[in-house]
Image (spheres, rainbow, N blue to C red):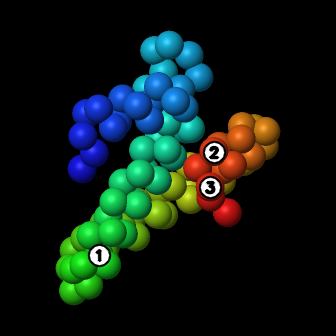
Amino acid sequence: MLKKEEKSKIVSKHRQHEKDTGSTEVQVALLTKQIDKLSEHLKKHSKDNSSRRGLLKMVSKRKKLLNALKNESPTRYEKLTRSLNLK
């Protein structure tokens, strides 16, 4: 889980307006951070299959959100993928 301070930094960096907490960009950024943390956990605990399943679900959700953003606004998609260093 992300700490409150980490989460607020990510939200403030990727939000579209002052009260934005749930836009696609914010959701993808939060999921990316969680995926990174869980990947580090799985490097140490390779047999933790329940966490691996959660990781796969998060990756799938992020992919769906990115595809929706790409169809909605390609420029916002490109900007987000560059800022998060995604392929």
- Separation (CA) of disc 2 from disc 1: 25 Å
Determine the residue positioned at 69% across, 49% down.
82
Q: Residues within 10 Å of mark 1 (few under 14, many from 20)?
A: some
Determine the residue positioned at 33% across, 38% down.
6
Residue of label 1: 42
Give the SS element for disc 2.
helix
Residue lying at the far bottom of the rendered structure? 47
Residue of label 2: 83
Q: Residues within 10 Å of mark 3 (few under 14, many from 20)?
A: few
Badge 3 amino acid: Asn
Determine the residue positioned at 34% across, 36% down.
7
The location of residue 31, given as percent across then percent down, is 43, 50
Badge 2 amino acid: Ser
**Residue 5, relative to residue 59: is it above or below?**
above
Q: Mark 2–mark 3 contact, CB under 8 Å?
A: yes
Determine the residue positioned at 56% across, 59% down.
63
- Separation (CA) of disc 2 from disc 3: 6 Å
Badge 1 amino acid: Leu
Q: Is residue 81 left or right of residue 71?
A: left
Asked if one can make out residue 66 in the rendered structure from this viewpoint, the answer is no
Residue of label 3: 85
